[in-house]
Structure formats: C-alpha cells, structure tokens
Image (cartoon, rainbow, N blue to C red):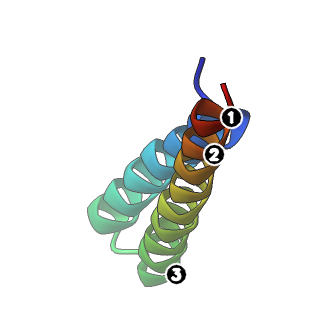
Amino acid sequence: MADHDRVEGAAKNMGGKVKEAAGKVTGDEKLKAEGRADQMGGKVQNAVGGVKDTLRDDRT
C-alpha cells in the first residue's frame, strides 16, 4: 500500500500543473509561479513517501 505522502504529493503535483496551465492561459505570472512551486512541493512529498515505503518494505 502506498504511503499517504506519496498519494498527497502526487495530488499536489497534479494540482500545480493545472494551476500553472491556468496561469499560462490567463497570463497570470503569479499563478504560474505558484503552480510550479506546488509541483516542486508535490515531488518532494512524493519522494519522502517513497522513502517511507522503502523503509517499511525493508522491515517486513
């Protein structure tokens, strides 16, 4: 079973992509930057979840 952080990180990454695309369409540079930041945060959170999964799998 995937770690909660991996699921939440993937969702944050996808939300950031949507936000960045909306910023591109509307020409809103702030929204684009927020979207890129959300994507980066999601990738980091996903990576943390992956490490947790690996550690949990190693214990079993």
**What residue appears at the point 71 percent right and 33 percent down from the top-left corner?**
4
Q: Nearer the viewer, residue 50 or 22?
A: 50
What kind of element bears circle 3?
Answer: helix
- Residue at image mark 3: 30
Residues under labels 3 and 1: Cα distance?
44 Å
Circle 1: residue type: Arg
Circle 2: residue type: Leu
Residues under labels 3 and 2: Cα distance?
38 Å
- Residue at image mark 1: 59
> Which quadrant of the view contains residue 38?
bottom right
| Residue contact at pointers 3 and 2, CB within 8 angstroms | no
Disc on the earlier residue, 3 or 1: 3
Q: Position of residue 11 (x, y in %)?
A: 55, 38
Circle 3: residue type: Lys
Q: Is residue 31 above or below residue 20?
A: below
Badge 2: residue crowd in 10 Å (few <14, some 14–19, many ≥20): few
- Residue at image mark 2: 55
Left or right, 24 with respect to 5, comes to left
What kind of element bears circle 1?
Answer: helix
Q: Which quadrant of the figure contains the N terminus?
A: top right
| Residue contact at pointers 1 and 2, CB within 8 angstroms | yes
Q: Is residue 51 above or below residue 36?
A: above
Left or right, 60 with respect to 38, comes to right
**What residue appears at the point 54 percent right and 43 percent down from the top-left corner?**
54
Q: Nearer the viewer, residue 29 or 49?
A: 49
Q: Position of residue 14 (x, y in %)?
A: 44, 43
Q: Nearer the viewer, residue 54 or 17?
A: 54
What kind of element bears circle 2?
Answer: helix
Q: Position of residue 57 (x, y in %)?
A: 58, 31
Looking at the image, is mark 1 or mark 2 nearer the viewer? 1
Residues under labels 1 and 2: Cα distance?
6 Å
Disc on the earlier residue, 3 or 2: 3
